Amino acid sequence: MAPTRLLTLVGAVALLALLAVGLVQLAGRSSSPGTTAARLTPAQVQVLLAGSPTPLAALHAQADQLLGGGARALRARLHALRGWPVVINKWASWCEPCKAEFGAFQRAAADLGRRVAFIGIDSGDTSRSEPLRFLRSFPVSYPSYYDPTGSLGVEVTDSTNVPVTVFYNRRGEAFPRQGAFPSAAKLEHDVERYALGA
């Protein structure tokens, strides 16, 4: 074999080896602890939530919807969920940390949604168009209550900040947490600790 051909062949093999190593590292990085999991497809979410109990299935049937009715509607929903652990996440479409944590909520709501009720509050968006556009681009398996004035969000979380998450255990005791969740693993840990374990 000619030296030029041999060098070309060795170079091609080396390039393929580097590409393979890079792909392996990239795959390892995307599934390592502390990172938000990849987005789930609606079909994957549906499989994970199949067979949910009726009160939780009712939430899943309203996935990605912005519900009206304010505090009265949310109180009625929480009354219907009495005895179930509940996680309420206050967010807004203009809030970058809120958008960054949506992957964690999508994954946790799919993983735990047969045992825990997830509900959103879209707080402070003055128009429905932006939050609906965001929900279409990053769907979750539960609805959000539309709160253009922010008053419902303050009532539930006792805070004007976003994001805020409130965990309710089966007895209805509330455990609020301010700030974004960096990963589904951290969110699921807190759901287990405050909503399921308390």
Image (tube, rainbow, N blue to C red):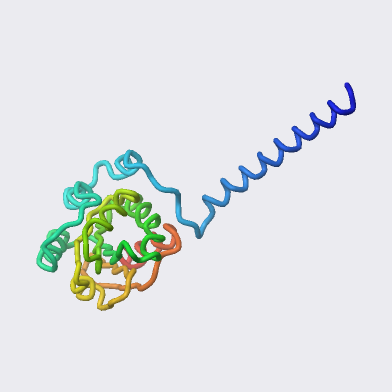
Residue at horizontal 84 percent and vertical 26 percent from the top: 5
Image coordinates for residue 194, horizontal then vertical, percent: 33, 68
Quadrant assignment, res 83 = bottom left
Q: Quadrant of the C terminus?
A: bottom left
Relative to 111, residue 157 above or below: below
Total marks shown come to 0
43 vs 186, left or right, is left
**Which of the two residues, 61 or 80, is positioned nearer the viewer here?**
61
Q: Quadrant of residue 22?
A: top right
The residue furthest top is 1
State the residue in front, 125 or 21.
125
Q: Nearer the viewer, residue 124 or 103?
A: 124
Residue 10 placement (x, y as % from top left): 80, 32
At 27% from the left edge and 41% from the top edge, which residue is drawn?
50
Q: Is residue 154 left or right of residue 41?
A: left
Percent across and percent down for residue 185 are 44, 58
Q: Which residue sits at x=43%, y=62%?
A: 186
Residue 175 picture location, percent across and down: 30, 73
Image quarter hosting the N terminus: top right
Vertical relation: 13 (above or below) 72: above
Q: Residue 147 falls in which quadrant of the image?
A: bottom left
